[in-house]
Image: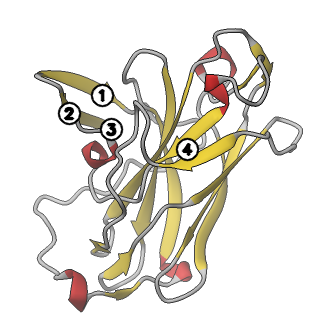
């Protein structure tokens, strides 16, 4: 899966490599949805599934993972917001990261907008953090994502991370306030480039 994003005055190519969690490539739409946001009913949990899209090769020091939420239902529906994210080590222990909705050097500061998904189309979320400069105490091996839905319920799934170790979303040495302990979460957006900060 490839996405191109304009950063500053130049163009930086961003590559999301398919994660080891498996799954097909993200559904693609040849044209923007003609369904108006107000016309699409809220999505139902049974119609949505999270899938991994691998790491995002981005800015210096950035370690990130891309996920997409697919509408597997038979009609267009609407979603909005930030997912709740929790990262775990290989033994299933929750890592004590700090989490933030948007902002920072890697993720847009724009607030969530209602996203209308036609059948077999997807919205994107990126979770990103700074590298561990002082070393690693624990490797994050899996993640739980849970997006509260407009009509009630949530779209939730537990997935393996595609990359572990120094290039992954590891918990750093240096205590809870180390810059590498903050994980920033994008809002759900229709196109991957919308997760990026404006420069």
User: Dots 1 and 2: beta carbons under 8 Å?
Assistant: yes
Q: As drawn, is 170 to the left or to the right of 92?
A: left
Distance between mark 2 and mark 3 Cα atoms: 10 Å
Distance between mark 4 and mark 1 Cα atoms: 20 Å
- Reading the image, the residue beneath label 4 is 22
Q: Residue furthest top?
A: 134
Q: Is residue 106 above or below residue 39?
A: above
- Reading the image, the residue beneath label 2 is 4
User: Dots 3 and 4: beta carbons under 8 Å?
Assistant: no
Q: Is residue 27 above or below residue 194?
A: below
> Which residue appears at 33% of the width and 58% of the height?
189
Sequence-earlier tag: 1 or 2:
2
Label 4: element kind = loop
Point out which mark residue 14 bears.
1
Q: Is residue 166 above or below residue 107?
A: above
Q: Residue furthest front?
A: 177
Q: Is residue 194 above or below residue 140?
A: below
The color scheme shown is: secondary structure
- Reading the image, the residue beneath label 3 is 1
Label 2: element kind = strand
**Image quarter (top left, top right, bottom left or bottom right) of the C terminus:** top left
Distance between mark 2 and mark 4 Cα atoms: 23 Å
């Amino acid at each position: 899966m490839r996405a191109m994003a304009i950063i500053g005055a130049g163009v930086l190519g961003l590559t999301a490599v398919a994660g080891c969690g498996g799954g097909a490539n993200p559904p693609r739409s040849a044209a923007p949805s003609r369904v108006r946001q107000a016309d699409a009913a809220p999505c139902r949990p049974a119609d949505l599934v999270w899938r991994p899209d691998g790491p995002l090769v981005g800015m210096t020091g950035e370690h990130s993972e891309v996920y997409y939420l697919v509408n597997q239902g038979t009609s267009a529906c609407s979603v909005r917001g930030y997912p709740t994210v929790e990262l775990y080590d290989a033994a299933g222990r929750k890592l004590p990261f700090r989490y933030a909705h948007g902002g920072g050097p890697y993720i847009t500061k724009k607030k969530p907008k209602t996203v209308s998904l036609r059948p077999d189309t997807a919205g994107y979320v990126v979770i990103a953090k700074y590298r561990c400069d002082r070393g690693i105490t624990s490797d994050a091996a899996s993640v739980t994502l849970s997006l509260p839905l407009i009509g009630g319920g949530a779209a939730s799934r537990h997935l393996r991370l595609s990359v572990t170790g120094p290039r992954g979303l590891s918990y750093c040495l240096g205590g809870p306030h180390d810059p590498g302990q903050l994980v920033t979460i994008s809002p759900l957006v229709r196109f991957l480039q919308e997760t990026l900060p404006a420069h």
